[in-house]
Image (tube, grey):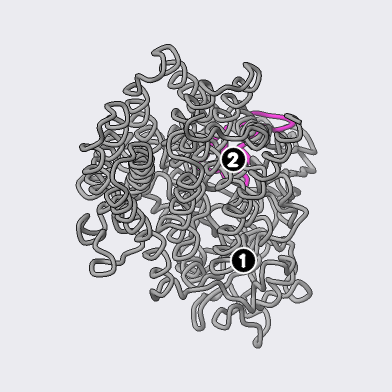
Amino acid sequence: MRLGRDIRGAALLLTATLAVSGGMAALVTRLGTTDLENYETAFVSLDRGTAMPTIQVLGHPVYTLAIGLGVRLPLHGSLGASPAALVAPYVSEPFSYWLLMTLAMAAAVLVVRHALAPMCGRVVAWLAAVVLFWSVPIVNYTITDDWPETAVTYCAVVACAFAPHALLAVWSSRRSWRGRIVAGLSVAGLVCGLIGASHPGYWPVLAGTLACTAVLAVMRDEYPMRARVSAIAVLAVAAIVAVALQVPDITREIGVAGGALASMSRVTEGPTGSLLRANLFPFGDDNARGPFTFLLMTLASLVIGVQTRDVRQRRLIVGAAAASLACGIGAVTLVPGSVAFAPSSTWALRDPAIAFAVLSAACAAGALQAAGGRRAGVAAGLAVLLLGAMQGPLFAAHILERPEAERRFDRERSPSGRTPAAARASTRGLAGDQVARKGRLALWPDVRVGMRTMRRASTDLADAGYMLVTAATKQRTMVGLVEPNGRLFGQTTDLSAEVLCDARVVEFLQLRYLLTPPGAGCDIWRPQMPHMVVDDRLDVQVATVVDNRVRALPRARLSAATASGPALSAGSSLWSELSPVPGTSVTVGPRDVVVEQEHPSGVTDTVLVLPVAYDSAWVASTGEVHEAGGLVAIVGAAQPHVVLTFVPDTPAVLRAIAMTLGQMLTCLGLLGLLLTRPSAAGD
């Protein structure tokens, strides 16, 4: 009988969780994007089996020669830690996106349910879940903006805010000790998995959320101090594991900048409105990135908490409300990037403010129900809290009517994400039978940004099999290769018009095609076909200069070439040093670079410079790998056949391990909590 009840309870919890998280994910997928290709800052995190070749570790992409001049992957975020990445290569993109959001929201919903049900009852717990996820942040990150990694981060923020209370609840329940251990490890696993999949730029926000909620957990003296400390310690370990495995990759990234780091800046965003006006909906501001924090509901919870007779309930209600107010004030007062570990977007502090506001309101509702007293007073208090809670979903729905929410990805060129990448590129005007996928393709200055603005991602071209030189490499700094690149985590390989019109550079980089606005270009480029137009506005031009010979410079000049500055910047002195080597050829393949030499003994005193961005993980089959102006240089390549391969180093391997660990812990955590029915109030 007990087993039957457990099975029915698990089935009911699974159904309800999927109804809430899956239904909301379906809604935002339908209203927002349906094409993950257009998330050009995150698309490689979900390896979808397209024509873009990658080097992989544990099934995760870590490097590709198909973007830029070779970059590490993923370009942005850590969505590969989501279990959705396991099935993404085999299913349609809308389903991948739906699954990504469903799993993230389901993980957070389960944590919220286990935290609130024992204190407030199951009805209040479900209402809290709905309010948290039909909310301004979710609509902001999935519909008005295209930030799937930040939407997952919001789910991580919610889970972090409720996790210690969920741990305390499951550890003090009447389950068997095995059940309590499984439930506790499941909560920790979900937190670890969500943090692992979240945006690294928001880790300071997650750390602050965990710190605030840890204080609230310590104040809950209805639990033994040992249990409270253990809950905080378990979550701290989970967070550290999720972050520690990715830190070497980030520190390597910062180290690549070298001496230029001091002059580089981060992309930062400060306050985007007034705290009071943002919370006066429908009469105040309606900015999707505004500091809407359920301020009115929080103040109502604070009043109820102060009047609550139960000291323990009072501490939690007032403490959570205070945390919400502190985060809300921080969202409108803190200066972004003021210190090294400050959040890049301080307005994102509204996310933990919302989580703590809902925690406070749910506990206040539970306190009202438990206190009894006059029914009219209880009903009035609950009505005020409910009205305050409904402000969030109504505000979120209102945002959909704003002009920025009307911007949609081009449905004709990316119909529901089900069209293969090659067919999508052909629909955009770049047909594979007319523009061969051999040789590299570059974009004229500002063309890539224009594609992004029009929601027609340049990365569609890489997914279709073209080797795309012009790209936003994001977390892979190219400051040593291309200037200007003044933002540390916002790097690009956009080439200037002067560089694109230099025959020496075009030959060296093996550029074959160039997309330009009408009238742009220069003598070394000619139209591929007069009638060929990409995105209804771009001409396709083909290079008139082709030379696949290896370029070299005297060995004695290597140090000077390295110190001469970025090779692909206007005015670089490297090109006056390089000269083609007779009887040689260089082929940039999908995963390696091959050099052929008829007379290798003749290059013993020269340095071969290859059209690939330097990376410490490059290994040559013969000779030593060095850097020359941000490019790969091989010293001592005295063999007829030289192969340059990317051998994943420790940071790349650790990041891949982090992604796999995140997938495993999320799956096991979801399974564990779905099989563990939350305790009801009074249990």
**Disc 2 secondary structure class:** strand
The residue labelled by disc 2 is: 632
The residue labelled by disc 1 is: 34
**Residue 163 in the image, given as x and y percentages of width and height:** 47, 32
Other-residue count near label 2 (Cα within 10 Å), few / some / many at <14 / 14–19 / ≥20: many
**Residue 552 in the image, given as x and y percentages of width and height:** 61, 44
Identity of the residue drawn at 31% across and 26% down? 312
What's the residue type where badge 2 is placed? Val
What's the residue type where badge 1 is placed? Thr
Please tell me whether residue 37 is drawn above or below residue 419 in the rendered image: above
Identity of the residue drawn at 62% across and 42% down? 82
- In front of the other: 212 or 652: 212
Please name which of the two marks, 1 or 2, marks the residue nearer to the observer.
1
Q: Quadrant of the N terminus?
A: top right
**Disc 1 secondary structure class:** loop
Q: Is residue 605 visible?
A: no
Q: Which mark is residue 289?
A: none
